[in-house]
Amino acid sequence: MSSGLSNRRQPHEQENLSKSLLRRLVSSTAACQKLARSPKESRPMITDDFTQALQIGQAAPDFLLRDTDGNDRSLSDFADSNFLVVIFTCNHCPYVLGSDARVEAVIARYKERGVGFVGINSNDAARYPQDSYEFMQKRAPELGYTYLHDPSQAVARHYGAQLTPEFFIFDADRTLCWHGTIDDSPRDASKATTQWLDDALEDLTGSGQLRVQTTQIQGCSVKWLEAH
């Protein structure tokens, strides 16, 4: 039996909904800004020099990296995302492979909330052939994010990435809000007792108040080029 109620929102309902969404976005962005104690910095560009690990409140270094379709991508390609999760990952690490399903579940949950995801593989493919660009292309269809190649490792060094998988969450201004890993057992889901990445994204897209800014990180070491 029809209740006689229309599914179409009335003008005042649409206005209230829009105001609610706006307040949530402003609150989420403010959470990063409140946690960041250092003044906002101009966005650094990638060079060949080492820099120290990114700290909460610092700007994401820009990059220009090739995706698995052969296109060059930079931070501006993800400008539509309210938050951007940068994942340093690879093709062979058991911590990466062991957490893939959980990462994909997080992506499915938060993409509709305006969160973008991008993966970066910086491993030395000469010593670890499974991490080559060609293997990235084979792996990409299984992933819910854009997969980028960092053969010079300059991006990994400027972000301060040390392990795979390692996660950095940036706000709409691409200021670092959160740094850590998916949970306390990336390799074996049955032993996980936390859900750090999910909690952080729930905080940022929900209440706007982060409970923590950083977590411990577990994973495989980035496979650096011999020269480094």
Image: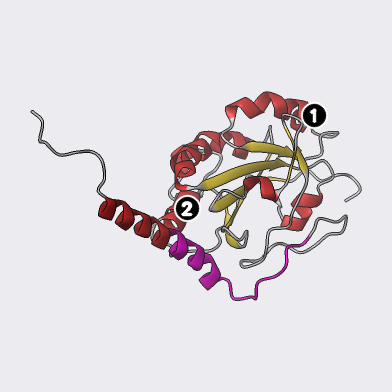
Q: Earlier in the sequence, mark 2 or mark 1?
A: 1
Q: Is residue 39 magenta?
A: yes
Give 190 or 43, whichever is nearer the viewer: 43
Q: Is residue 213 above or below residue 48?
A: below
Q: Is residue 116 left or right of residue 53?
A: left
At 53% from the left edge and 63% from the top edge, which residue is drawn?
Answer: 213
Q: Quadrant of the N terminus?
A: top left
Specify the label residue 142 is tagged with. none
Q: Name the kind of residue labelled 1 in the image.
A: Pro
At 66% from the left edge and 27% from the top edge, which residue is drawn?
Answer: 139
Q: Is residue 127 magenta?
A: no
Residue 103 placement (x, y as % from top left): 52, 40
Q: Is residue 219 visible?
A: no
User: Is disc 2 in contact with disc 1, using a CB cutoff of under 8 Å?
Assistant: no
Helix or strand or loop: what does disc 2 sit on? helix
Specify the label residue 129 is tagged with. 1
How many residues crowd mark 2 within 10 Å: few (<14), some (14–19), many (20+)?
Answer: many
At 54% from the left edge and 38% from the top edge, which residue is drawn?
Answer: 99
Q: Is residue 82 visible?
A: yes
At 52% from the left edge and 45% from the top edge, which residue is drawn?
Answer: 185
Q: Is residue 127 left or right of residue 189?
A: right
- Residue placed furthest toward the right: 227
Residue 16 placement (x, y as % from top left): 30, 57
Residue 109 placement (x, y as % from top left): 44, 41
Q: Name the kind of residue labelled 2 in the image.
A: Leu
Residue 220 placement (x, y as % from top left): 68, 44
Give 151 or 114, whichever is nearer the viewer: 114
Q: Which residue is mark 2?
A: 201
